[in-house]
Image (cartoon, rainbow, N blue to C red):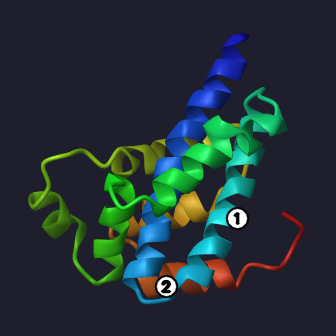
Amino acid sequence: MAVTTRWACRSGGAAKNVIAIAAGAVIGAGLGENARAALVTRGLAELSRLTVALGGRAETASGLSGLGDLLLTTTGPGSRNTSLGTELGRGRSLAEVLAGRVGVAEGVATAPAIVARAAQAGVELPICAAVADLLAGDLTVGDAMGRLLARPRRDE
């Protein structure tokens, strides 16, 4: 396996944690399962673009290590990243949520790193960027949703 392909697989695995935070925020904000499904679908497109840009194959994002892991992480009741996002969506601050946790939500540290890596590769990740801004305190959940919904429609 080429080094770039390994990087692509690892980045996709890291990005799904960031997308899970966004999926949780959607649920915590009361936007419902349809909104989460739309977000996860757009998140899969982000994961696929990043995988390809880093030398991986698009099919990787559609398989068990891509879509399967993404679905589990964004909908599983035990997901640390989704539950963190749910609390953010309910209006709690990141500091409050982290103070009450024992486990690590990997997406918190991964969000800014994955956005920076994608920028180096020339890939736009609007969901991951919104999560990074939310975690940094630069954006509210409502503003993040507004920013994502204001994007022009395109095939994904």
- What residue is rendered at 46% in x and 50% in y? 111
Q: Residue most toward the right?
A: 155
* Residue position for label 1: 41
Rendering quarter of residue 92: bottom left
Rendering quarter of residue 13: top right
| 110, above or below 90, in the image | above
Q: Secondary structure at mark 1?
A: helix
Left/right placement of residue 47 relative to residue 154 reads: left
> Which quarter shows the C terminus?
bottom right
- What residue is rendered at 43% in x and 44% in y? 110
- Residue 98 lies, in percent from the top left, at 17, 58
Whether residue 119 is visible to the viewer of this picture, yes or no, is no
In the image, which disc is placed on residue 143? Answer: 2
Q: Residues within 10 Å of mark 2 (few under 14, many from 20)?
A: few
Viewer-side residue, 118 vs 48: 48
- Residue 53 lies, in percent from the top left, at 78, 36
In primary-sequence order, the first of circles 1 and 2 is 1
Left/right placement of residue 89 relative to residue 73 reads: left
- What residue is rendered at 50% in x and 88% in y? 31
Name the residue type under label 1.
Thr
- Residue 49 lies, in percent from the top left, at 77, 46
Viewer-side residue, 121 vs 41: 41
- Contact, mark 1 vs mark 2 (Cβ under 8 Å): no
Left/right placement of residue 147 relative to residue 74 reads: right
| 51, above or below 125, in the image | above
C-alpha distance separating marks 1 and 2? 20 Å
- What residue is rendered at 78% in x and 26% in y? 55
Rendering quarter of residue 152: bottom right
| 142, above or below 120, in the image | below
> Which quarter shows the N terminus?
top right
Whether residue 45 is visible to the viewer of this picture, yes or no, is yes
Q: Residues within 10 Å of mark 1 (few under 14, many from 20)?
A: some
